[in-house]
């Protein structure tokens, strides 16, 4: 179903350092440049969910350390004064990447040490596997968000939007004509676009970026140039005036298709067809353009109202062999290359044989659960509290013809508590969990331990809270078998990690392990969640057997 594209972005490959060696992708002391060549002077001293331009997914935050753990050695924090860096003129000022001047091998080594220290009291040394980094750690961000703002000293606009007249030219096509009021050209220098300075709302203009997708960056700059040429005022957040607030650009990881969302401070978009034609002419890779209207005085980027200006309003992309439909509001991983690495490793650690029921807790749009459904799970039950995400998950399952996965719109903790309290539970059982940065809840972890899955695969964007939760599971009778750091956001302080735990079997017979905490017998390999305290699950598509059709009732009250 994916439409062909000539401008397919280069895929960055991932790598893992060999056991016992320093994680490295190039000779020490030489940092790679965006062109792939080693930069001189790589010695030190020279953001998702979503890294730079998004949420701080994976960033290490201070947290209470597990008992007995050594204090982690974090990668260097952002300096008080900017350091020069040949790879980026805005380095040290924008909030994008704090480690760009550090050789990539050193970044990986620091992140490896952070994770190793956090789990030193809970896992044997051999359980901590080498970090999975990238062979080409540049231009990996397939989603780019950029604000537009008037340059300092420019007069403030008097209305929410600047009118742009359209008149036919000799060829019968339309072209923009500025009114006399806008005769004084804005000029590119009058419109700022780039990244916000760390800890402020001051915009740092950038024409290049070492971690953003290059096609996406080209779109951002093309919009700025069209705005300057046509007299389209950028949004002034202090005055609440101007028209164009943000551009959000998504580039398909495999397909190369490009979705552009233009966020405006008003519903009416004068000359929108001419704008789309001009933007698509400048960046032929663009396949669809959407207008998002946000007139609120807020730092929230997207509003609720949208309309498609050009193309189908969505793009298609492939991740881990599955096809996903991505709209302007859809959640999709920022670094798709490393997402495949992360998911491949998580599924490998899950050890699926074709008999397991997999619970995908905090499933979001169901990406990893759907991968599990295709790669060895007998069936998958995904649960998340966000109804829109569950709808997307069910649609993604239908789009890929996956019938052994179902998704539930419910709080993950409540779901687990109800399932643990029921008389019959699925077996064999594997738990996949990928909670938000704050980690899971004690009640969730207690219910997980009561269900006694054969394996728990815990994915986290915050190893500090992950270590806290894993300690709870260890006390409940689990052992840490594998800890695998993954570098999802090179040149930042972010690191993700996967922990695989298995139930300790000392002094317990197989029969005892198959009983619930209150002695309730579990039907081996039944693969079902039956009626009883959780009878409502069957109504949500969790029917007995393997022929599960993903369903979601949008009218169902949320827990």
Image (spheres, rainbow, N blue to C red):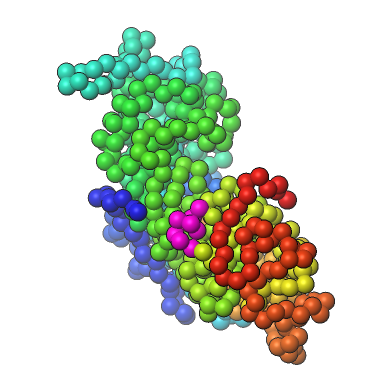
Residue 473 colored in magenta in the image: no
Q: What is the x, y in percent for residue 381?
A: 61, 64
| Secondary structure character of the magenta stretch overall | helix
Quadrant of the rendered structure where residue 410 is? bottom right
In the rendered view, tell whether residue 2 sits above or below residue 344: above
Residue at the farthest top position: 180
Residue drawn at 71 percent across, 47 percent down = 557
State yes or no: residue 398 in magenta: yes
> Which residue is found at the position 17% from the left and 21% from the top?
171
Q: Is residue 68 left or right of residue 183?
A: right
> Bounds of the magenta span?
395-402
Residue at the spot x=32%, y=21% of the render? 230
Q: Can residue 410 be seen in this view?
A: yes
x%, y% of residue 429?
Answer: 63, 74
Relative to 390, does residue 190 appear above or below in the rendering? above
Q: Quadrant of residue 187?
A: top left
At horizontal 54% and vertical 72% (from top left) the residue drawn is 377
In front of the other: 352 or 163? 352
């Amino acid at each position: 179903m994916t439409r062909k594209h000539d401008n397919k972005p280069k895929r960055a490959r991932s790598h893992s350092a060999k056991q016992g060696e320093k994680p490295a992708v190039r000779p020490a002391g030489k940092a790679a440049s965006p062109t792939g060549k080693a930069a001189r002077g790589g010695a030190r001293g020279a953001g998702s969910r979503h890294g730079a331009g998004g949420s701080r997914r994976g960033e290490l935050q201070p947290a209470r350390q597990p008992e007995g753990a050594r204090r982690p050695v974090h990668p260097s924090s952002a300096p008080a004064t900017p350091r020069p860096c040949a790879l980026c003129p805005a380095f040290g000022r924008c909030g994008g990447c704090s480690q760009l001047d550090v050789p990539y091998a050193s970044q990986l080594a620091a992140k490896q040490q952070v994770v190793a220290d956090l789990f030193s009291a809970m896992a044997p040394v051999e359980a901590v596997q080498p970090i999975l980094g990238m062979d080409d750690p540049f231009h990996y961000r397939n989603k780019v968000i950029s604000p537009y703002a008037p340059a300092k000293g420019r007069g403030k606009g008097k209305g929410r939007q600047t009118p742009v007249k359209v008149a036919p030219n000799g060829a019968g096509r339309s072209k923009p004509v500025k009114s006399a009021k806008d005769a004084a050209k804005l000029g590119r220098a009058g419109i700022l676009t780039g990244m916000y300075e760390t800890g402020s709302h001051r915009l740092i203009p950038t024409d290049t970026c070492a971690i953003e997708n290059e096609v996406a960056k080209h779109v951002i700059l093309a919009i700025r140039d069209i705005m300057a040429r046509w007299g389209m005022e950028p949004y002034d957040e202090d005055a609440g005036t101007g028209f164009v607030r943000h551009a959000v650009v998504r580039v398909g990881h495999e397909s190369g298709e490009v979705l552009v969302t233009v966020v405006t401070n008003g519903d009416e978009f004068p000359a929108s067809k001419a704008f789309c034609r001009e933007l698509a002419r400048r960046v032929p890779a663009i396949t669809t353009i959407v207008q998002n209207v946000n007139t609120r005085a807020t730092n929230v980027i997207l509003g609720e109202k949208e309309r498609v200006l050009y193309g189908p309003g969505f793009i298609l992309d492939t991740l881990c062999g599955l096809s996903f439909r991505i709209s302007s509001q859809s959640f999709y991983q920022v670094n798709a290359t490393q997402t495949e690495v992360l998911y491949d490793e998580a599924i490998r650690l899950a050890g699926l044989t074709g008999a397991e029921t997999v619970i995908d807790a905090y499933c979001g749009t169901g990406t990893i659960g759907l991968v599990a459904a295709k790669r060895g799970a007998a069936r998958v039950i995904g649960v998340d509290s966000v109804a829109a995400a569950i709808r997307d998950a069910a649609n993604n399952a239908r789009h890929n013809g996956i019938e052994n996965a179902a998704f539930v719109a419910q709080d993950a903790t409540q779901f687990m508590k109800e399932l643990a309290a029921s008389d019959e539970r699925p077996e064999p059982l594997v738990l996949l969990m990928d909670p938000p940065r704050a980690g899971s809840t004690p009640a969730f972890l207690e219910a997980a331990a009561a269900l006694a899955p054969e394996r728990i695969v815990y994915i986290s964007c915050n190893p500090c809270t992950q270590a806290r939760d894993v300690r709870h599971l260890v006390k409940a009778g689990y052992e840490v078998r594998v800890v695998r750091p993954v570098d999802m956001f090179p040149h930042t302080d972010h690191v993700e990690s996967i922990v695989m735990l298995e139930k300790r079997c000392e002094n317990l017979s197989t029969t005892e392990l198959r009983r619930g905490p209150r002695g309730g017998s579990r039907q081996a390999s039944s693969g079902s969640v039956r009626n009883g305290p959780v009878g409502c699950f069957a109504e949500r598509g969790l029917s007995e057997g393997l022929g599960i059709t993903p369903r979601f009732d949008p009218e169902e009250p949320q827990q």
